[in-house]
Image: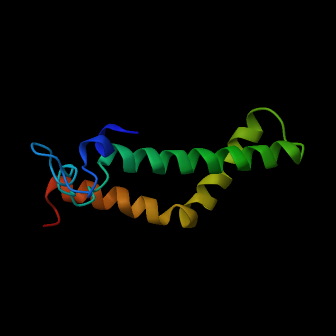
Amino acid sequence: MDFRSRALGDAGRSLPGWPSRPPSAAPPTPPSRSGLLAINARYFMLRALIFGVVLAVVLLLGVNGFLAFAVAFVLSGLVSYPVALRQRRAVFGALAQRRGWLR
């Protein structure tokens, strides 16, 4: 038997001095917008993931050494342009709003 149920009488009503229902927590707050750091972190992680996948594919194709990193760098840049477009726009929008370009 938990503490709350002991506080209620047999009829289901509160005993004197006890609230009739549990106090609610703080009022719900509107969802906060992600900060600039979180937006940049998501964008960076997406770009790093794309680079890692492209580097693995380039290495599987047999290109080794510095040339593999250079080819992966160029190809991941080309691939990430359309793939990370939404995150890039979010970064630019957050920067613009922070600097007051958009009101």
Query: In the rendering, at what x and y percent does residue 96 appear?
Result: 23, 59
Q: How many marks?
A: 0
**Frontmost residue, 55 versus 97:** 97
Image quadrant occupied by the C terminus: bottom left
Tell me the residue at 20%/52% (across/down): 24
- Does the rendering let one see residue 41? yes
Tell me the residue at 47%/51% (across/down): 43
Dividing the picture into quadrants, the one containing residue 69 is top right
Query: In the rendering, at what x and y percent does residue 85 appear?
Result: 48, 65
Query: In the rendering, at what x and y percent does residue 28 appear?
Result: 22, 58
Check the image and name the residue furthest to the left: 17
From the viewer's perspective, tell me whether residue 62 is left or right of residue 38: right
Tell me the residue at 14%/44% (across/down): 18
**Frontmost residue, 31 versus 97:** 31
From the viewer's perspective, tell me whether residue 35 is left or right of residue 68: left
Q: Give the colouring mode of the picture.
A: rainbow
- Does the rendering let one see residue 71? no
Check the image and name the residue furthest to the right: 62
Q: Is residue 84 above or below residue 71?
A: below
Tell me the residue at 57%/64% (across/down): 83
Query: In the rendering, at what x and y percent does residue 21 appear?
Result: 21, 54
Dividing the picture into quadrants, the one containing residue 32 is bottom left
Check the image and name the residue furthest to the top: 65
Image quadrant occupied by the N terminus: top left
From the viewer's perspective, tell me whether residue 56 is left or right of residue 84: right
